[in-house]
Image: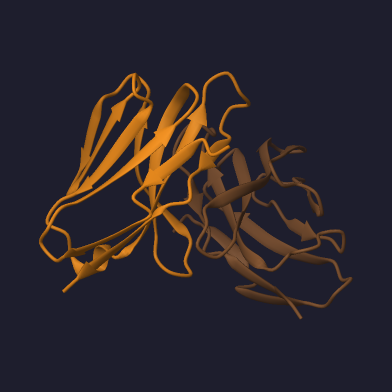
Chain colours: A brown, B orange
Amino acid sequence: DGGITQSPKYLFRKEGQNVTLSCEQNLNHDAMYWYRQDPGQGLRLIYYSQIVNDFQKGDIAEGYSVSREKKESFPLTVTSAQKNPTAFYLCASSLTGLDGYTFGSGTRLTVV
Amino acid sequence: SQQGEEDPQALSIQEGENATMNCSYKTSINNLQWYRQNSGRGLVHLILIRSNEREKHSGRLRVTLDTSKKSSSLLITASRAADTASYFCATSRLNTNAGKSTFGDGTTLTVKP
């Protein structure tokens, strides 16, 4: 079955550490996205990529980095520069970007 | 500022009743999408309506779009306890990098058995 997989489901980060969240899709979608969701709020766009080897900053890119070396994969690194990283992170993909998104099940990141 | 804003923020109804939630946006759009999110889970795509469409149906869901008022509504008919979730609208703007959708803060729907 086609889908989008995020791992891990839960992640704990110590102060000053970088952590990488995985996002893999087998839907053959061109576009991929990372969103952040804080409790009781909507989704805010971190980074997005419309094609392999290309990506753009979203609304809240500071303290995050991404790569898109393969069509299937769009990992997100939360760096130590991100001052308030505790949140629910959602990865999504879209066939062209102008149709509906398929979301992963999310990664809950907590700073300890 | 929010491109998509849902109203109301929270809605509580009895099973069998209809639920209506609204989304307003500020700039011209390519399309508008509605999603459902169960607590602690990812979002599920419900319906996409394009700017040249006025109404779409999918099962018990009905979405309308009024581009002159920059608003959309999602109607869930004959609601069930399983419809309890948060509902988000998202808009893909015209004349911007393709495929960058902006989400609102959502409407939390509670359906009481």
The residue positioned 67% from the left and 44% from the top of the image is A71
- Quarter of the image for the C terminus of chain B: give it: bottom left
Identify whether A59 is placed above or below B40: above
Looking at the image, which is closer to me, B56 or A93?
A: B56
Q: Residue furthest bottom?
A: A112
**Along the viewing direction, whichever of A70 and B101 lies nearer the viewer:** B101
Instruction: Tell me: A13 left or right of A11.
Output: right
Residue shown at 87% from the left, 64% from the top: A80
- Direction from residue A34 to residue B104 in the image, left or right: left
Q: Nearer the viewer, residue A25 or B19?
A: B19
Q: Horizontal and vertical percent for residue A91?
A: 59, 54
Viewer-proximal residue, B5 or B85? B5
Q: Which residue is rendered at x = 80% and y = 49% of the image?
A: A62
Residue B36 x/y as whole percent: 37, 55
Looking at the image, residue B85 lies above or below residue B51? below
- Classify A105 as above or below A68: below
State the count of labels: 0
Residue at left 58%, top 18%? B95
B94 vs A44, left or right, is left
Q: Where residue B84 appears, x then y in whole percent?
A: 29, 65
Q: Is residue B13 above or below residue B31?
A: below
How far across and down, in percent of the image, does residue A41 sit? 52, 57
Q: Quarter holding the N terminus of chain B?
A: top right
